[in-house]
Image (cartoon, rainbow, N blue to C red):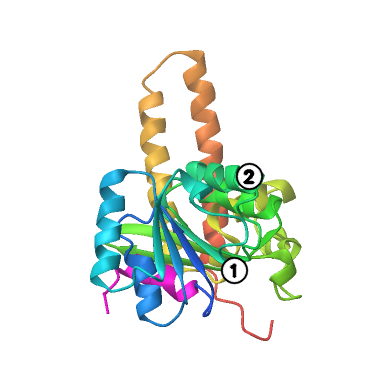
Amino acid sequence: MIKLSKRLQTIADRVTAGARAADIGSDHALLPVYLLQAGKCPSAIAGELNTGPLQAARKQIAEAGLTKAIAARQGNGLAVLEPGEADTVTIAGMGGSLMAEILETGRQAGKLEGVRELVLQPNVGEEIVRRWLTEQGYVLQSESLLEEDGKLYEVLHALRESDSPDDVTNEWLYDPSFLSVQLGEAEKRDWLYRMGPYLLREREELLHGKWRHEYAKLARICAQLEQSELPESREKEAQLRKEMNAIEEVLSCLRTAKPSSSS
């Protein structure tokens, strides 16, 4: 059985056993091959836009003896799917804006028909993906933040609202009342989308480091803006310092003790 990276293994672990999977932007088809070798999925589709990775995927699938169970297809995003062909779609390793665009284009074309589960790993722009999920009737079931080769990755696992447990709803996830910070309700909700409702609730340790890094980046930009006498620089600096203050406010929640399971 092939061995996956920590990032891909986290994605594989979130896929529901027995699901027909479609991996979009599959590269070498490592994830679909693993899912079948592990007996987790009966069939899979490996979608890839570029010819080089597609050929590598087909080679990987052939070497694993899975050419009858995994279809490697060339196409843009969800264009490789037919409606009702997959139960689970996985997409990893791209920006959140592009990921949401792929999902929305596919949704409008009917490609997400029958897809009850999404496992997504955006490299940046996680907030955009969370908002798309909420707007299109998917509910986050879990979020994972992991570190690999010095980089942090977020893995989002979502189910269609009709398949989500009764006690897991978007209303509950993005209810900002548990954030005891001096921000307005709308601002609190925005930060839930940006940082992740589960990651914040669970006081995920890596989350603090990720956003301290973001804070430091904003501080460096502000230091550069201070050197400028342009009015727009003052305005931009004020905007960034407001964001830095909000980051400090929300991170203060992560320094408190985790709530008990009975709370």
Q: Position of residue 235 (x, y in %)?
A: 54, 23
Q: Position of residue 185 (x, y in %)?
A: 73, 51
Side of 181 where 56 appears, left or right = left
Residue on which the image places disc 1: 201
| Majority secondary structure of magenta residues | helix
Q: Is residue 150 something that shows in the picture?
A: no
2 or 1: tag closer to the N-terminus? 2
Q: Please identify the quadrant where the C terminus is shown.
A: bottom right
Look at the picture and state if 108 lies above or below 23: above
Mark number for residue 215?
A: none
Q: Residues within 10 Å of mark 2 (few under 14, many from 20)?
A: some
Disc 1 element: helix
Q: Residue furthest front?
A: 68
Residue on which the image places disc 2: 109
Residue flagged by tag 2: what amino acid is it? Ala
Per the image, is 88 magenta? no
Q: Is residue 105 something that shows in the picture?
A: yes
What residue span does the magenta drawing correspond to?
A: 1-14
Q: Residue at x 51, y 80 (%)?
A: 17
Side of 215 where 184 appears, left or right = right
**Residue 23 or 8: which is nearer the viewer?**
23
Q: Residue furthest bottom?
A: 262
Q: Position of residue 26 (x, y in %)?
A: 37, 56
Q: Residues within 10 Å of mark 1 (few under 14, many from 20)?
A: some
Residue flagged by tag 1: what amino acid is it? Arg
Side of 166 where 147 appears, left or right = left
Q: Please identify the quadrant where the N terminus is shown.
A: bottom left
Look at the picture and state if 228 lies above or below 168: above
Q: Residue at x 50, y 34 (%)?
A: 240
